[in-house]
Image (spheres, rainbow, N blue to C red):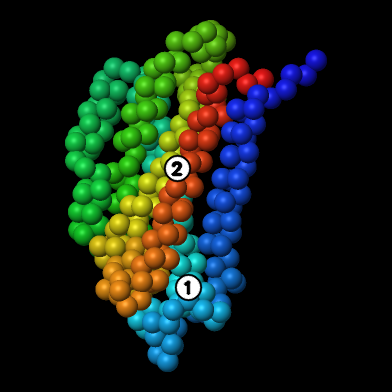
Amino acid sequence: MKRKMSPTMKKAWIRFAILVLLTLIFVFFALFASVLAPFDPLESHYADMLKPPNSTYLFGTDQLGRDLFSRILYGGKSSLLIAFAVTAIISTVGILIGAIAGFTGGFFDNVLMRFSDMLMAFPGYIFTIALVSFIGIGLPNMILAMSLTGWTYYARISRSLVLSVKNNVYIEQARLGGASRIRILLYYIIPNVLPSLLVNIFQDIGGKLLTISGLSLLGLGSPPPAPEWGFMLSEGKNYMYSAPWMLIFPGLVILVSVVIFNLLGDCIQDLMNPKENVW
């Protein structure tokens, strides 16, 4: 007889579906910014400078008469691209390094973990700012700087998870069956620890969006006049009282996107680790 899903689990799945839908909407608007944007984000309309939101300019215009809605759409494209790229790089590198260190142990484990400890001794955000300032601004340099400082977190978590499963019965059976160490690592260990890391991965996307916006706010993102959410905030703060929409809309988009990815990570955690027997 089929048992019903518990009300708690139903709510968790509903929340998950809503958050996935909102995430897909954000990604859709970012991917198709060139089609959905009503104006060129770099085109100035000097007759329409600092126009408040209206039927023509949904989010108003900035100090150069550029459409804020179009600039936010294009800014989302670059921000999400960097956030996804950096998260994919650091999670892949960190998980592999941590898994290898935890599985092999010994000298290799000590060297990798001490190196990661050394990197983690520096505040990640400050280290990223210093690297971008040194190697120069731009999207590739931002991705490189954020990747160099972010993988240690995943390496630490991955190593601890591998240490907790590497002596399990199914791993021993794989060894007795003649499986090589690489095969055991790739086919038995990593697939079993990866689901536990999904929560961190989705939440980290939100964190990376915040870091990207912060770097752009400091002038360390793409060079102007490229549309970026953080840079739009930087411009908007100079018109806080005369044109508050220049500050409000980019800030709201950053806030909503970060909250969505963080809540999505929390929801995945609830689905993976229910607090009660939900079936």
Tell me if residue 90 comes above or below residue 107 in the rendering. Answer: below
Pointer 1: residues within 10 angstroms few (<14), some, or many (20+)? many
Viewer-proximal residue among 111 and 120: 120
Circle nearer the N terminus (1, 2): 1
The residue indicated by pointer 1 is 59
The residue furthest right is: 1
Q: Position of residue 175 (x, y in %)?
A: 51, 11
Query: Could you tell me if the residues under marks 1 and 2 are in contact, i.e. CB atoms within 8 Å?
Result: no
Tell me if residue 169 comes above or below residue 93 in the rendering. Answer: above
Question: Mark 1, mark 2: which one is toward the viewer?
Answer: 1
Q: Position of residue 204 (x, y in %)?
A: 41, 42
Q: Which mark is residue 242?
A: none
Viewer-proximal residue among 216 and 274: 274
Identity of the amino acid at label 2? Asn
Give the side of residue 189 with respect to residue 130, left or right: right
Give the side of residue 279 with respect to residue 273, left or right: right
Residue drawn at (46%, 50%), measured in percent from left and top? 84
Residue drawn at (58%, 56%), measured in percent from left and top? 25
Residue drawn at (29%, 63%), measured in percent from left and top? 217
Identity of the amino acid at label 1? Phe
The residue furthest front is: 241
- Where does the C terminus fall, quadrant-wise? top right
The residue indicated by pointer 2 is 262
At mark 2, the secondary structure is helix
Q: CA distance from mark 1 to mark 2?
A: 26 Å
Tell me if residue 148 comes above or below residue 249 in the rendering. Answer: above
Pointer 2: residues within 10 angstroms few (<14), some, or many (20+)? many
Q: Position of residue 176 (x, y in %)?
A: 53, 7
At mark 1, the secondary structure is loop
Give the side of residue 33 with respect to residue 248, left or right: right
